[in-house]
Image (cartoon, rainbow, N blue to C red):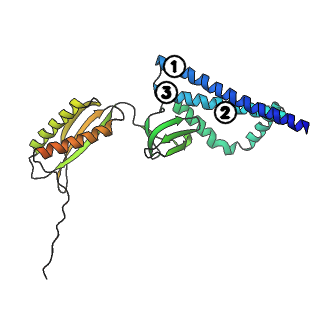
Amino acid sequence: MLAAGLWAVKFLLIIVMFLVIRSIGRRVINRMFDKAATHRKMSSGRIITLQKLVVNLFSYVLIFVFAGIIFKQFGLEIGTLIAGAGVVGLAIGFGAQGLVSDVVTGFFILLEKQMEVGDYVTIGGVDGIVEEVGLRTTHIRAFDGTLNYMPNREISTIANHTRGNMRALVDIGIAYEENIDKALVILQDACDKVKEKNPSIMEGPNVLGVQMLGSSDVVIRIISKTINGEQWAVERELRKALKEALDANGIEIPYPHQVQVEKGA
């Protein structure tokens, strides 16, 4: 009974030590990366990516060490535990190929800086913001709030939308009866006014001309280059400004009409 109580006290002390060391270790790691951020030697996304990775690695190593200490309390030596782990690892080696593939792929993603925390990416049909890049999984937060956990081995292609300026594209239709040259001048004037008020626009907006002859309208295309992440806001602002400009000048934007015909008795 006394031995069981003594073992329980030791186990409790080990848990307390684990929590204290983990807390102190995380604080030290966070301070190190905070100092690196102040020197601005790396981008903020790169710093956050590596910071989360180092914290995870520290946690894994700490769990392994304290697991060894707890096993030793049962009378099992760490060397015996490691040897046993080697035998088990040999037995399940073929089944662990997926895990090895995750780690290798994650390593090269980090090494080649293919994506960082805060980047907007498309991976495997999933669009969203990268929240964490680990050696085993990558976490992507979709725009509806869903957090996707993607094994690194399933990442074959990464479309990173956060590298370089982005394109804002707007198509707007006018009626076939309208004067196209007049409409182009009006639209370009509206684009120039938007450019003056919006610092997110890096180039354009430029009215390219007629993009398509639709079934009921002539489609005119406008493009612009914007700061990363601002392309959608610029597109919304352009659509509003272009619609108002066409309305102010009496140029019709076609839309579906319904005609109701009543037969007499």
Find residue 128 and report its horizontal and vertical position in percent.
44, 41
Q: Earlier in the sequence, mark 2 or mark 1?
A: 1
Between marks 3 and 2, how big is the CA–CA gap? 21 Å
Quarter holding the N terminus is top right
Count of numbered circles in the view: 3
Residue 7 image-quadrant placement: top right
Judge by depth and name the residue closer to the eye, 90 or 65. Answer: 65
The image quadrant where one finds the C terminus is: bottom left
**SS at circle 2:** helix
Label 2 Cα crowd, 10 Å radius (few <14 / some 14-19 / many 20+): few
Residue 174 in percent (x, y) is at 15, 49
Residue that carries the numbered disc 1 in the rendered image: 36
Amino acid residing under circle 3? Arg
Q: Nearer the viewer, residue 141 or 168?
A: 141
Between disc 3 and disc 2, whose residue precedes? 3
Horizontal side of 30 relative to 174 (left or right) equals right
| Element under disc 3 | helix
Q: Is residue 28 above or below residue 181?
A: above
Q: Quadrant of residue 248?
A: top left
Q: CA distance from mark 2 to mark 1?
A: 23 Å
**Residue at position x 60%, y 39% in the image:** 101
Is disc 1 placed on a helix, strand or loop? helix
Residue to which mark 2 is pinned: 60
The mark lying in front, picked from 3 and 1, is 1
Name the residue at 54% across, 43% down.
Answer: 149
Q: Which residue is denoted by mark 3 in the rendering?
A: 46
